[in-house]
Amino acid sequence: MTNKIMKSIMLVSGAAVLITITLVTMLMNSYSREKTAEGLKQDAEIIASALELNGGRYLDITQFEDIIRVTWISDSGKVIFDSIEDPETLDDHSDRKEVKDAVKNGEGLSARYSDTIMHTTINYALRLSDGSVIRVSGIHRSILAQMMNMLGPIIIILVAAALISAASAVLISRSIVRPINNIDLESPNTAACYRELEPLLNKLRVQNARVGRQMDELRTNQDQFELIMGSMSEGIIIADQKLNVVAQNTAAAGLLGSSSFRTGHSIYALNNSEGFRRCLLDALGGRRSECIIHTGNGDREIIASPARSMEMVCGVAVFIMDITEKQKLETMRREFTANVSHELKTPLTTIYGISDMLAGGIVKAEDVAGFGENIRSEAERLISLVTDTIALSKLDEGTVIGEKETVELIPFVEEILSRLELAAAEKGVSTSVSGENISIKCERLLLSETLYNICDNGIKYNKQGGSLEVIISEKKKHVLITVKDTGIGIPHEQQDRIFERFYRGDKSRSGKIKGTGLGLSIVKHSVMRMGGNIRVESTPDRGTTFTIELPVQ
Ligand code: ATP
Ligand code: MG
């Protein structure tokens, strides 16, 4: 812009100087021509009056200046006198324009330009009373021709003027452009710049504000998107056609067992297993593909979908889900079914065997009662197994077992212990309940199942003449129910497993203590359903303490 303004200023000033010079030269030229003609006229009038008085003798005795030429022409056109040339050598002058005009009008003026001498000759002719014509000619030197004589100084003046105008052009253009250059485009200040730019700057300010708002919106959307992506437990990866990662969330790398990963790298850097590769290649081939891969941190389900642009696959979107827990539950479900079938089969086989013997009549009459007792005991086992399985499946499905009720704990525990009186008496185990009589709100049946199972264990796995103590206390809006026995205890390595379905300790199996191994699973589920937790502390041969923590409300 500075250059353009500078060039324009120089061009305009150059043109102005040239036009001025041309016009002034033309003006001066015409003025000087008029002056020359006027001088010639005066000379001609003086000579004419002298001729009228003195006749031709005047011309012969008068010495004329070099700068003028005097010619006397007779009325027939013949040259009678000429101050420079011999009149005999000169041709007839009657056809000269100034002579013709003088004969006709009394005076005549003409100008003839000579290329050779680059000057104009001006002729002024005056008719005398006898019809002859006196003509005075003079040379008019044009201003241009005069200027040619001063070419050197003129060139110096022009160069100096050009330099001065160039310097001024630079300074002026810079000073014009400076306020524009100083505009802060982020927050334009109209007061500090040209008024002509005000509408533009106002528009810029409005647009800046709009762009700012849009950027804020974009940033908010981006933040929200990143927040959602970042808080997702599922992994998402977007990869391009070459399977280089374009975008991913934080969960993705962790789920695929990679600690650090940067966008732009190959997706295989995250996981290189056969299944993962096949899944991605299928998606690149345009097919949605699913697979399960095993990482060091667990099992992952992978869903890879092709991303299309204009019907062409341009990338892959990969979803990663942690299915470790799901797989575990699936395994547990399979084991549970197998265990239930097995546990059902054992008593049923016994019942079938005995009834077969009875039907075959091979059992002696005195043994029938014994076999009947066996059938009853196995049937009892079956009933307890089926009851526990139903209870567990209800807990698994989350079926509501009952409405929440207010339960006064001391009488509630006393009632449970009374149901176990017979078993306790058989083993000589003394039972007691102590502590604060706190009331809690819970599903009565769940609490009853929980405490019954734990107290049942505390008697079953106790020593002859041992004790079972239930203590109730309160701690920060929670109630602690501690069930303490002096029984056989649980080895440390088994303590984590006792809550598993069908898990039974070695001693309970070998000691022929009856049970299905479902009691503590029901306890754990019930406690979780009531929003509490359970922990166990045990020392083999010394005893076991279960502590249940439940919210009061
Ligand atoms: P069920 O309760 O279904 O009749 P169970 O008592 O064998 O059978 P759980 O109550 O689930 O099953 O207990 C699992 C195992 O934990 C028991 O077999 C036993 O080995 C151990 N156990 C549970 N409670 C005690 C305890 N108070 N003292 C010692 N061992 C215990
Ligand atoms: Mg039990």
Image: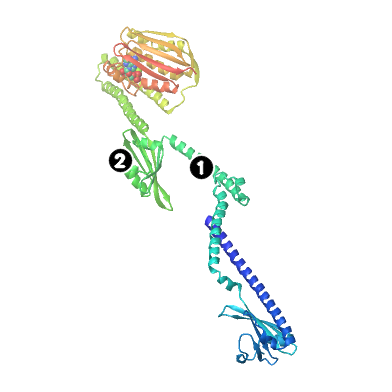
According to the picture, the residue beneath numbered tag 1 turns out to be 218
**Which residue type does callout 1 highlight?**
Leu
Residue 400 shown left or right of residue 536 in the figure:
right
**Which residue type does callout 2 highlight?**
Ser
According to the picture, the residue beneath numbered tag 2 turns out to be 273
| Foreground pick, 43 / 207 | 43
Residue 436 vertical position relative to residue 82 in the rendered view, above or below:
above
Residue 180 vertical position relative to residue 381 in the rendered view, above or below:
below
| Mark 2: C-beta under 8 Å from nearest atom of ligand 1 | no
Image coordinates for residue 431, horizontal then vertical, percent: 38, 8
Q: Secondary structure at mark 1?
A: helix
Residue 90 shown left or right of residue 394 in the figure:
right
Q: Earlier in the sequence, mark 2 or mark 1?
A: 1
Residue 383 vertical position relative to residue 425 in the rendered view, above or below:
below
Category of crowding for the residue at label 2, using alpha-carbon neighbours closer than 10 angstroms: few (below 14), some (14–19), many (at least 20): few
Q: Quadrant of residue 150?
A: bottom right
Which mark, by number, is residue 146? none
Image coordinates for residue 153, horizontal then vertical, percent: 54, 66
Residue 376 appears in the picture as rendered: no
Q: Secondary structure at mark 2?
A: loop
Residue at the outermost front position: 61
| Foreground pick, 426 / 211 | 211
Q: How is the image coloured?
A: rainbow
**Distance in Å between CA atoms under marks 2 and 1:** 38 Å
Residue 300 vertical position relative to residue 488 in the rendered view, above or below:
below
Which of the four quarters of the rendered structure image does ligand 1 lie in?
Answer: top left
Category of crowding for the residue at label 1, using alpha-carbon neighbours closer than 10 angstroms: few (below 14), some (14–19), many (at least 20): few
Residue 48 shown left or right of residue 276 in the figure:
right
Tell me how many marks there are: 2
Image coordinates for residue 346, horizontal then vertical, percent: 29, 24
